[in-house]
Amino acid sequence: MREMLTGGPLDVLTGDYLAELTMLILGRDRLKDPAAGYARTFLRQLEECLGLARDRGVRVVANAGGLNPAGLADAVRALAERLGVPTRVAHVEGDDLRERYPDSLAAHAYLGGFGIAACLEAGADVVVTGRVTDAALVTGPAAAHFGWTPSDHDRLAGAVVAGHVLECGAQATGGNYAFFGEGDVRRPGFPVAEVYADGSSVVGKHDGTGGFVDIGTVTAQLLYETAGARYAGPDVTARLDTVRLERVGVDRVRISGVRGEPPPPTLKVGRNRLGGFRNEVVFVLTGLDIEAKADLVRRQMTHALAESTPADIRWELARTDHPDAPTQETAGALLRLVVRDAEERVVGRAPGTAAVELALSSFPGFHVLAPPGKGTPYGVFEADHVPQESVEQVAVLPDGTRITVPAPGGTAALQDVPEPPLPEPPPPGPRRRAPLGLVAGARSGDKGPDANVGVWARTDPAWRWLAHTLTVDRFRTLLPETEGLRVVRHVLPRLRALNFVVEGLLGEGVASRARFDPQAKALGEWLRSRHLDIPEDLL
């Protein structure tokens, strides 16, 4: 927060503190303390920077309120009084739908930006919210500044795209970037968006900060955790197939041409509930006969757990071992056992006890990566939808006045966009077996049980090849774990990109931690590492 306030000019400083897993964590916190449920890190940052923000005339908008935005607003007021910094604090509520979903730890509708706009128009210096969309942290201030109305769909859609680029911080400035070697990303700065009255924007960063901003870094973030051409939100549906990107200077990329459509008639609801309990043991297998050692300990553990078999038992063998390895660590493979069950006793001590009891009677070189734990609860994320008009969004202004923010006047049901025509295929020529990542970037992520992998080309010739080569069937061949799952390919020619959605790959979502990579963060890098026949002129 201090870096952003001191590094260059700002009108509004936004902060995105919430994710599906965060809501579960905050829900568990609130079970222990009803006054909890918000991101305490926000308060710690604000303690250092509240006076600085006021001196510089910067307003702060954050969704750090989590499950308890009113509680956080009170805490900010108390902080401001203690620091002697006059601060007008407002908050947005109405997203909490736990009464409708009594079996959930947290159940929250994703609200839009007009509650934030109402707070800012009333003169708030700090606005905290519960569950709003990540992009609402930008659309709200933009709507307040320019006087946009809910019918300004194109302008709102442009701000949504800018907000989506900003929401993950340094992921737009070289962080987690496929071609990270092209700049100094040891400590990338955070992105800044200059939003204009027509909804266009220029994404950059404060001068002198690390990392870099170019068309590739912006493209990667646009593809992150999205799907098809229509990117739906509570205020507007943004058409990602209309986005135009243009480099307009060093570390400056203009986003323009974004078309907007009426939002869908329903709001997304994120539900987090306790799914049961889990435990994990990682066995280290060293040297020769890795597969045979893994088979032995699998059979021994199955026998040891037979009296009270967990409902879900998963084994994964990671072949991290190297032949004739120069160090013991590089000679080892990791065999991961994950057990889950509705009853804590089934997965609590039993797996760890069974593993320890095998220590002197199993494969040679037996040891585990860490002492076995006692088991922990895990969560399940589920998405639902409710009518927009059934959720009352309320802006609580600095003077305590409560204003109901009306639902959008016009909505439109979501429909698939017809697939656009593909570019001309590349001419025939010599090809060479090589990794896909030599000619394409990728960014992947999670949405509940589904994973998405956005893949883009950086030149027109590479795009012609990619569009015709990376079909759904080829995608499944390159990533065999997707076999048997529904995979949908979306074509975005203006971004020279394909966006793949793999349904059900992540089981019950990140909180259940069923996979080695439970949020699919590295799925795109696995894809880029796979080999296929690539035209030599692209290499």
Image (cartoon, grey):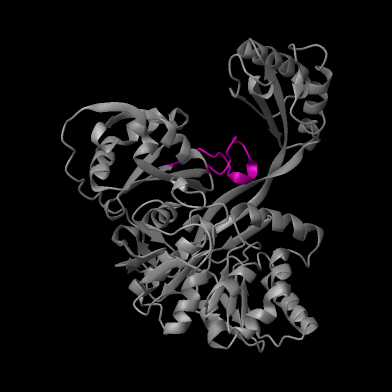
Give the percent coordinates (x, y) of residue 337.
68, 27
In the rendered view of the protein, which quadrant contains the C terminus?
top left
Above or below, 222 against 207 in this view is above
Residue displayed at 43% across by 46% down? 179
Q: Is residue 309 left or right of residue 18?
A: right
Residue displayed at 49% across by 76% down? 140
Magenta stretch: give its range. 502-521
Quarter of the view holding residue 59? bottom right
Residue displayed at 35% across by 72% down? 200
Residue displayed at 33% across by 72% down? 154
Give the percent coordinates (x, y) of residue 484.
43, 30
Above or below, 25 against 235 in this view is above
Quarter of the view holding residue 260? bottom left
Above or below, 342 against 174 in this view is above
In front of the other: 491 or 350: 491
Is residue 78 within the magenta segment?
no
In front of the other: 133 or 521: 521
